[in-house]
Image (cartoon, rainbow, N blue to C red):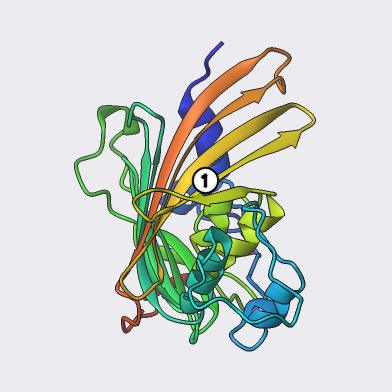
Amino acid sequence: MNTDLEEQLIESMRHKVDGIALTGDVLERATRRHQRHTTRVRIGCALGVAGLAGALAAGLTLGDGVTPRHDAGKAPAVQTETASLRLVNAAVASDNISYRMRLKTGNQSGKDGLTYEGAFDPRTATGYVRMPQDDSVMTELLINGTRYIGGEPPLGPLAPDKGTEHEKYGRYGQYPGKYDRLSLYGGADTVLGAAAPDPAALFKALKDADATTTENPDGTLHFEYTTQSKDGSTTTSGDVTLNADGRIAKVALAGTWRSTAKGRLDTGTFTATLELFDYGVAVKVERPKDVVPAN
């Protein structure tokens, strides 16, 4: 039995705005409709430029079955770079540099999707992301590590089923504490969720998922993995495209899932494409004028 993609995808990709006592405005509505899953994976110091050789020498591979030589023999004049090594190098090149991003999700027919657009500078923990909906544009701002989440007016007229009451647009909740990345609504168990706020985390996320990584004939990198839960499983495959500078430019994936969480067998499909571009861009974000505390 197929279930609507939105039931599966919205729960894993959207976030929740909570702790803001605003009766009848867009923030309260967002509180009811979204669940935030903040991804906290990074590639780590061991995969930095200085530690990369040591990590590889320890036998770090990603499913292509190639392990570095430990003997003192003379290296061949020409060596083929493995798929996993290319991905490691791309992750290192994509670390600690600003970028713009565009994330599109949907099912394999291309319908019922969501679109997120934003920019982020990890050096200053400053950036933004916007996700248009039919009643608002959900917006997250990060300024020197301080997080604000709110809603802006919709891009078009309100749908008839949304009523005629005026929404309190432009009001943002300010969250306590400091954050080092945007929460781009990716579940912590998804590779794409890891790559969205932190491109350098892609390699680690694939390694943690025990993914098999190979190289396509066109030079893009292909990966496949399956995750299991007590109620079902998800099988995912995708491709990683690098730009001319060797940085991660696009991650496109598709998958199928099965679940018995509701006492029946539900199945579905999903697709998602993350584009990363304009590396090194200057990212400036202004603090909202209408701000209230958020828990």
Q: Nearer the viewer, residue 122 or 21?
A: 122
Relative to 121, residue 141 above or below: above
Residue at left offset 52%, top offset 73%: 89
Relative to 95, residue 35 above or below: above
Relative to 226, residue 87 above or below: below
Residue at left offset 67%, top offset 84%: 51
Where's residue 31, x and y in %?
55, 48
Horizontally, residue 91 falls left or right of residue 154, namely: right
Q: Nearer the viewer, residue 272 or 183?
A: 272
Horizontally, residue 197 falls left or right of residue 247, namely: right
Relative to 119, residue 45 above or below: below
Residue at left offset 56%, top offset 76%: 76
Quadrant containing the C terminus in the rendered view = bottom right
Where's residue 160, x and y in %?
26, 28
Residue of label 1: 13
Answer with the quarter of the image where residue 97 lies.
bottom left
Answer with the quarter of the image where residue 19 lies.
bottom right
Residue 288 visible here: no
Amino acid beneath label 1: Met
Residue 41 visible here: yes
